[in-house]
Amino acid sequence: MNEWIAFLAGKFNYWGFIVLMMIGIYAIIAKKNLIKKIIGMNIFQTAIILFYVSTAAKRDAGIPIITHGHGMSGHSARAVDYINPLPHVLMLTAIVVSVATLGVALTLAVKVYRQYGSLEEDEIADSIRARAGGDQ
Amino acid sequence: MSWPMDMLILVFVIISGIGAITVRDLLGAAILFGAYSFLMCILWAIMGAVDVAFTEASVGAGVSTVLFVAAVFRTTRRTRD
């Protein structure tokens, strides 16, 4: 029992990442509103960024700026004292990409609303079907 | 780095994420998504990723909320789920 509590509590960031990812994928699949789907996509993206930032975190480590670096050329920095900065740099790119995809997705949603007068997926499908039936 | 604070903020992040996809008003969903992004930014600042945190605070909580509100005002607030 104690091992289970330690297992669940020791990696709780990863459990939170899994829960957030499932919330995002549920919103993408099950919600019918296009804006809700876009919010779900963004939650999915931030969950993956949370996973990468969690892999970089260390206990009892400072932010990755070398302390006492100036004037001590013979002194080498110990990697144990610093959080791993490589996943942070990768995830900075991912955040910028996510806001670009958000802008494109919202633009497409606005265009769909102007064309069909609705943001609900089933109403859009109905009006597409009605237009196709009217042509024949 | 304080781990109970980390866990508390993570619970708030999950609650606001569930709220953002369940509320039946798109403007409310946009504002709740802004709160989600800002709580996520606080979580990353606690975990030591300060550069990711302030990029998320400006881009995720700032620009994304503005884009969502602009899109909602150009379309409709009504939603069925």
Image: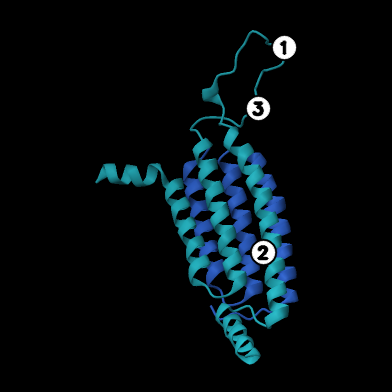
Amino acid tagged 2: Ala
Residue labelled with disc 1: A71
As displayed, is residue A33 above or below residue A136?
above
Q: Which color is chain A depicted in?
A: cyan
Instruction: Tell me the quarter of the picture where residue B17 sits.
Output: bottom right
Element marked by disc 2: helix
On the image, the x and y values in percent for residue A135 come to: 65, 89
Q: Label 2 vs label 3: CA separation?
A: 37 Å
Amino acid tagged 1: Gly
Q: Label 3 vs label 1: CA separation?
A: 15 Å
Tell me, for residue A105, which label it has, or none: 2
Tell me, for residue A65, which label it has, or none: 3
Which residue sits at x=61%, y=81%?
A124
Chain letter, blue: B
On the image, the x and y values in percent for residue A15 come to: 42, 50
Which residue sits at x=63%, y=78%?
A119
Q: Label 1 vs label 2: CA separation?
A: 51 Å
